[in-house]
Image (spheres, grey):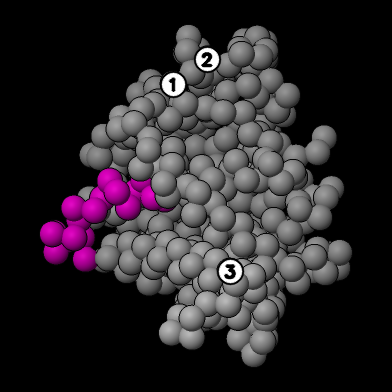
């Protein structure tokens, strides 16, 4: 059901906002060009930050600065940033003695700049030269826009797991962002590529240091404070993603725990009618958790019934794909094809990627199911107020 909601909403977004956009290298001219700051939080990014800073220096925007925040890295990130300071006058560096997490690093960077808009990008990513121009047009169109989330693309494609994630970011992430923008509220900005209005961040107290997914939390804080979020698919960014099962599991488990943290933190919003536009987003995630535990019970009943037949009074659903499985497969195929159609503007579909995408819906549902089941109890066991510090992720096969 949600797949068809996403597909319908994404088509509306495409026809209403995206279809007539000019080429990527020719964004609409802005009415003014205020100063922006690229905030780059870094933890153990010694292998990647040099390429990122040189990439940001190629941005086609007349007035910007780069603020790199070294959050207590244990590798040579600090030394590399100090070397780059001598090379790039527009670069400023903040060194934090200890690892306090991405949220605190972003806040530190935001507090030392006078820029009107803050463009946040991860230390292992590469930004399109025109991304800032595409993002800023939304802020001038509506003074209530607090953030504009960009369009991350996958750089790591040397394995089947990497190529599957190419499809995920088009047929799942991109589709959902388009649909949620159509319906008015977004579950989360993409923390790897997002631009904020400084006054909006200041009004909600910046990022929360105890949230495992600071991007989900700041999205909810802004929207509950009546700030709007926009999705700009032309604000492209290329990112590194895990290409091992263990790395992907750790990443998705953190995402799942962060989503559950958000449900817990903002559960009191139900008593405030002003938050009514967030109700459906909340219910969607809550329903997905309920679906996961229902699936778990069904799977356990099916396995037990194969070993010891259960009483006839207990209904046992078959886990062997039948007609329902065919419907799900066709739905997944339609979703993938729709995502590829929208994304042809940003990168041509590769035949080898299309082949592995056939398996993506199964992989996505299973991974989401397992991480939700494990992540939910782990979230409740987490200490209240505990700092969400950095953990070096899997960056794919080098």
Task: Where is residue 28? Give x, y as percent.
Answer: 53, 58
- Distance, label 2 to label 1, CA atoms, is 8 Å
Mark 2 = which residue?
72
Asked if disc 3 and disc 2 are in contact, CB closer than 8 Å, the reply is no
Residue 57: quadrant of the picture: top right
As rendered, which of 270 and 228 lies closer to the eye? 270
Q: Which is more N-terminal, label 3 or label 1?
A: 1
Which mark is drawn over residue 304?
3
141 to the left or right of 43 = left
Residues 155 and 1: in front is: 1
Q: Secondary structure at mark 1?
A: loop
- Secondary element under disc 2, as helix, strand or loop, is loop
Cβ–Cβ under 8 Å for marks 2 and 1: yes
Residue at left offset 45%, top offset 63%: 293
Up/down of 348 relative to 208, above or below: below
In the drawing, does residue 39 fall left or right of residue 221?
right
Closer to the eye: label 1 or 3: 3
Foreground label between 3 and 2 = 3
Q: Residues within 10 Å of mark 1 (few under 14, many from 20)?
A: some
Query: Residue at image x 30%, y 29%?
Result: 385
Residue under the image location 18 percent in, 60 percent down? 270
Please state which of residues 276 and 146 is positioned toward the viewer in this rendering: 276
Q: Which residue is mark 1?
A: 100
The part of the chain drawn in magenta is 258-276
Q: How many marks?
A: 3
- The verdict on residue 270 being magenta is yes
């Amino acid at each position: 059901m949600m797949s068809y909601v996403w597909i319908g909403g994404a088509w509306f977004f495409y026809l209403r906002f995206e279809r007539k956009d000019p080429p990527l290298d020719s964004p609409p001219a802005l009415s003014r060009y205020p100063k922006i700051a690229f905030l780059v939080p870094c933890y153990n990014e010694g292998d990647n930050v040099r390429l990122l800073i040189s990439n940001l220096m190629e941005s086609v925007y007349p007035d910007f600065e780069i603020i790199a925040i070294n959050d207590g890295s244990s590798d040579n990130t600090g030394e590399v940033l100090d070397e780059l300071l001598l090379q790039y006058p527009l670069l400023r560096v903040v060194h934090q003695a200890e690892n306090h997490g991405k949220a605190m690093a972003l806040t530190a960077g935001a507090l030392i700049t006078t820029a009107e808009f803050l463009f946040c990008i991860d230390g292992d990513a590469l930004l399109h030269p025109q991304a800032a121009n595409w993002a800023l047009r939304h802020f001038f169109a509506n003074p209530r826009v607090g953030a504009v989330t960009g369009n991350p693309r996958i750089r790591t494609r040397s394995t089947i797991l990497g190529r599957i994630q190419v499809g995920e970011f088009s047929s799942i992430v991109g589709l959902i962002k388009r649909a949620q923008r159509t319906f008015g509220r977004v579950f989360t900005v993409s923390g790897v590529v997002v631009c904020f209005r400084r006054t909006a961040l200041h009004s909600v107290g910046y990022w929360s240091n105890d949230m495992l997914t600071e991007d989900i939390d700041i999205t909810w804080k802004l929207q509950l404070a009546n700030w709007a979020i926009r999705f700009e698919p032309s604000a492209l960014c290329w990112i590194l993603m895990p290409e091992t099962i263990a790395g992907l599991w750790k990443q998705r488990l953190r995402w799942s725990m962060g989503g559950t943290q958000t449900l817990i933190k903002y559960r009191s919003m139900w008593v405030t009618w002003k938050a009514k536009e967030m109700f459906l987003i909340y219910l969607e995630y809550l329903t997905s958790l309920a679906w996961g535990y229902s699936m778990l019970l069904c799977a356990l009943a099916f396995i037990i019934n194969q070993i010891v037949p259960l009483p006839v009074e207990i209904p046992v659903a078959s886990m062997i794909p039948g007609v329902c499985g065919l419907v799900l497969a066709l739905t997944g195929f339609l979703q993938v094809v729709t995502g590829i159609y929208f994304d042809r503007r940003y990168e041509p579909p590769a035949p080898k990627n299309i082949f592995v995408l056939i398996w993506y819906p199964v992989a996505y549902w299973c991974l989401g199911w397992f991480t939700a089941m494990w992540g939910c109890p782990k979230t409740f066991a987490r200490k209240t107020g505990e700092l969400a510090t950095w953990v070096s992720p899997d960056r794919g096969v080098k």
